Amino acid sequence: MEVRDGLKYLETHQWMREEGDQVVIGITDYAQTQLRSVIFVNLPEVGDAITAGKPFADVESVKVVSDVNAPVSGVVSAVNEVLMDEPERLNEAPYEAWLIKASQVTNTAKLLSADEYRAYLETL
Amino acid sequence: MKEIFDLIVIGGGPGGYTAAIAAAQRGLRAAVVERRELGGTCLNRGCIPTKAMLHAAKLLRDIRQGARFGICAPEAQVDFAKLLEYRNGTVRQLVEGVEQLLAANGVVRMRGQGMLLPDGAVQVTEEDGVHVAQAKNVLLATGSKPRMLPVPGMDLPGVLDSDGLFALEALPESLTIIGGGAIGVEFAEAFSALGCKVAILEAQPRLLPGMDREISQNLRMILKKRGVELYLDAMLEQISQEGENLTCSFSEQDRRARVSAQYVLCAVGRQSNTDGLFASGAACEMTRGFVNVDAEFRTSRPNVYAIGDLIGGALAHNASAQGMSVAMRLAGQTPSVDLDVVPHCVYTDPEIASVGLSEGDAAARGIPVRAEKFLMASNGKTLIEGEERGFIKIVAGAADGRVLGAQLMCGRATDMIGELTVAIANRMTVEQLLRGMRAHPSFNEGIGEVLEQFGCGAIHAMPRRGQK
């Protein structure tokens, strides 16, 4: 179970990093193992608003649809088009296959460091 | 001709011949003027030949993937000459069928160019002479033709419209398709399955830009998986000859790019066909080349009607429904079909079909709706037939549960859309649609499942997971 250093984490199994005035959001290795084989990713459009704690995307495995909740509020500034063609990248490289970038970020949920997230995973 | 017809139809395509037969069935004396083959674009240069090629293409794909069903024939080959024989033979059979139907219903067939005269009569220019036919009513149904782009190089040999592509007698090695709408994606699907290397250039950010976003995304993923190159947000700048090939130069978002192929297909849309239709002083009011009509398809000229691609759009069943409507009114009947509820089908694999409002449409119009989706991966028939990712979405009014739209991308979508078109035309609610039991195992069951999502959930869908 990889937890990558240098990223921030949420208890809802997203990772986040800052990139200038944007944040880059993805799902963790733990999340992708829970999802099993991803076959489709429903991403928002650039310009859509996202609300902390509410779903902003969903991920389909063969039979199950799982919501991905937003760790922050803000506006979608980019979506990862690679996932539209190769959704399985989420399983292969969860820390490279980011889902969205967001700007005008407010309302950040409680962020964990890599170590804190590792510790949290132990409790599950 | 001394007699005065009740109805002369100029144009023997699906709109025209339907109107003529419907009129004759209701006791009206009708004639059809057609200078080419009956059946128009649809039978001869559109729907039928395309779907025949798609059928052969799907058959080849299914056979080549047959090992997963225990049917092993990896040596399956394309005999393009035989494929054309099948395609052209099917077209010929249907054209003959229309000829027989017209004759059997007593509709007079005039073989020549029809032209509307200022007094409302119709001049017919046949091989052996010109004559004038009189009618109480004239219906213009001359359809449409492919539109080319005003881009340098569009007139190079090898740059084809859909008519030209159908005339090819050998399978192209490679093909660049300008336009990612229904026509472009269908040709991409057919030709790439048969072994041609295909690239699509689409100016909008997604394929099938008029349809629900998820359809675009699902199709994009599947076409890419099948080896079709996709260039979206791509504006064609010019076409040039480079040796044996044609190179399309385009701007894609913020960069310039090029793609080369043996042939280029321009599939950006169609324009109305009014060639030789109006004598001087006899033209109807038009907007951007399309004939203006009122709600009952009357043009600006008395007793002259117009339908089909000539008034806008490019859909055979829409033209037929309009033709039927005009004929019924002329016979004193109230038309049956709701002309505002029009299904759209794209014959990719899986098939695509939609009718009514998408979620996006509803949002743009400020209509509060609820949309539910069922993934066909949970449907037995879908699994049996090894279909790619498919889904059925239904959009219903938030307040009253009335079905306002449906978007399907799955097996048999083009056959299932009828149920939902009927539901919308009859203003039915989700609950009313649930009264019907759907057979098992069928693709159609998927409709029942998505309807259940509006209640307590589809039986065969795993409960949706919130982020843990």
Image: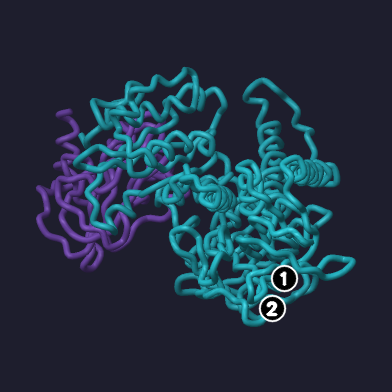
Q: Which subunit holds the residue at mark 2? A: B
User: Which chain is painted in purple?
Assistant: A
Rendered-image quadrant of the N terminus of chain B:
bottom right
The picture quadrant where one finds residue B438 is top left
Is residue A34 positioned above or below B104 on the image? above
Instruction: Locate residue B325, reporting x and y percent.
Output: 52, 49
Q: Nearer the viewer, mark 1 or mark 2?
A: 2
| Residue at the image point whose x is 54% and y is 71% from the top | B301
Name the kind of residue labelled 1 in the image.
Leu
Q: Is residue B412 above or below residue A68?
A: above
Q: Amino acid at mark 2?
A: Gly
Task: Bin the neighbour count of mark 2 within 10 Å (Cα to Cα): few under 14, some 14-19, many 20 and up.
Answer: some
Please name whichever residue, B248 or A7, is drawn nearer the observer in this view of the structure: B248
Above or below residue A99? Residue B382 is above
Dot label at residue B153: 2
Query: In the image shown, does B104 or B155 lie closer to the viewer?
Result: B104
Q: Which residue: 72% across, 39% down?
A: B56
Q: Are marks 1 and 2 in contact (CB under 8 Å)?
A: yes
CA gap between label 1 and label 2 equals 9 Å
The chain painted cyan is B
